[in-house]
Amino acid sequence: MTSTRTTRRTALAAGLALALGLGVTATASAGGPRTVTGKPADPISRIADFYGAYIDARSDPDGGGELAEELRKYYLTPGLQKKLKAWEAKNHADGVLRAQNVPVQWKVTDNGTANYTEAGITFTWGSGKTTKLVVDMTRDLKIFHIGTKGAAGS
């Protein structure tokens, strides 16, 4: 029992460290070393950090539990959290991912806007199929919209 609690606490702490921009990821692949970079004040980095941590949490056997909820609280506006809960109740799926399962890969692309940041998110699923979402972030680095169209087109 104690090791399960310790493991959960360690996972929660690691996830929050990543969410707070304290984690840096570098991995090696067959083609040579890869580097992943980001900046805490850069909206696209923040959106990518959120999705990376959120998908990691949701991939856990317990579905992310507390960590997924804490990530939502940290990165999403209260208004969006409320909208996602309503969407999830209606659609019986995860509102952040707009799906019942977890993608095997994701890509974040800057769509650019003047008053806020709009990013395109492309998910790749186990079948190889891809889906796309649009995520909008305020200037104070909080995600206020997740959907198939940008906030202006909602």
Image: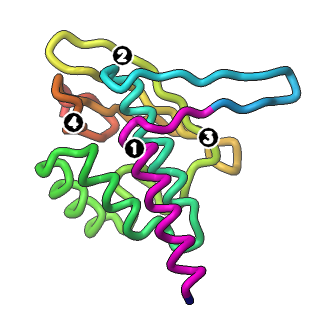
Q: In the picture, residue 147 is in which quadrant?
A: top left
Q: Identify whether 73 is placed above or below 60.
A: above
Residue range in magenta is: 2-25
**Residues under numbered marks 3 and 2 in contact, where contact means CB atoms less than 8 Å apart:** no
Question: Mark number for residue 105?
Answer: 3
Foreground residue among 124 and 52: 52
Q: Which residue is mark 1?
A: 19
Residue at 37% from the left image edge and 31% from the top image edge: 46
User: Earlier along the polypeptide chain: callout 4 or callout 2?
Assistant: 2
User: Earlier along the polypeptide chain: callout 4 or callout 3?
Assistant: 3
Q: Secondary structure at mark 4?
A: loop
Question: Mark number for residue 46?
Answer: none
Q: Which residue is mark 2?
A: 111
Q: CA distance from mark 2 to mark 1?
A: 22 Å
User: Earlier along the polypeptide chain: callout 4 or callout 1?
Assistant: 1
Q: Amino acid at mark 4?
A: Lys
**In the figure, is residue 136 to the left or right of 16?**
left
Q: In the picture, residue 33 is in which quadrant?
A: top right
